[in-house]
Amino acid sequence: MKELKLDFDDFMEYLISKHQNVKINYPNLDIQESDLIKILMASYLDKFAAKLSLEFYEHPITVAEIDNVIDNYDFNQIRNEINFDFKVPDEIEELETKVKIKSKGKVFIIHKNDADHFPSNPHAHWIDSNLKIDLSNGKCYHIRKHISTLSKKEFIDLRAKATNLGVELPELK
């Protein structure tokens, strides 16, 4: 019997459970959910012939595919980095960032061409936790579930900073 591919919500839910297991197995490492997503993307983007990393979410994968990659990955190597100058070839389309917003040590990103328009277009991402902020009303979502709302002061400040940086924001709801 062929295993079903996970839809986005089930994928994120399963990934959260895998993240908890990884944190238990590697207690001395600060491994984020976004690290698991990056590992999966690196493993499967070629399979899907994707040009942008966000296209990864348009090609669901199975639990077995997730397990195969995550269970066999050496997370001790995850923080090793090599920095070098690299010019991205003109043929490569990059996901262009509109703005990065820092708040209390967290970095939120608003993309120019985000393929996912939930919860607003545009919206802010906190990649490390898959948290999204609806820029039309300040509601915060985790895996498409409303979990909190920014205070009026925080929301006004966020919109003002984004507007000052030239971001076209959705209308207020």
Image (cartoon, helix red, strand yellow):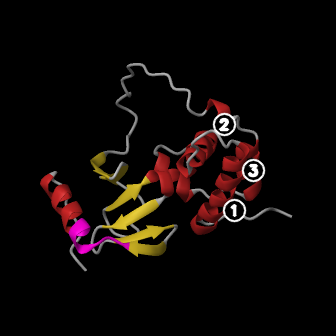
Q: SS of the residue at dot 2? A: helix
User: Does residue 170 lie above or below 34 as drawn?
Assistant: below
Image position, residue 107 (x, y; %): 36, 49
Numbered range of the magenta stretch: 149-155
Q: Which residue is mark 1?
A: 5
Residue 152 falls inside the magenta stretch:
yes
Q: Residue at x 38, y 27 (%)?
A: 89
Res 157 quadrant in image: bottom left
Cα gap from disc 1 to disc 2, whole angstroms? 25 Å
The amino acid on which the numbered mark 1 sits, given as a three-letter code, is Lys
Q: Residue furthest right?
A: 1
In the picture provided, is 149 more to the left or to the right than 57? left
Crowd rating for badge 1 (residues with CA inside 10 Å; few <14, some 14–19, many 20+): some
In the picture provided, is 11 more to the left or to the right than 169? right
Image position, residue 119 (x, y; %): 39, 70
Q: Earlier in the sequence, mark 1 or mark 2?
A: 1
Q: SS of the residue at dot 3? A: helix
Cα gap from disc 3 to disc 2, whole angstroms? 14 Å
Q: Residue at x 67, y 61 (%)?
A: 14
Q: Which residue is mark 3?
A: 67
Image position, residue 3 (x, y; %): 79, 62
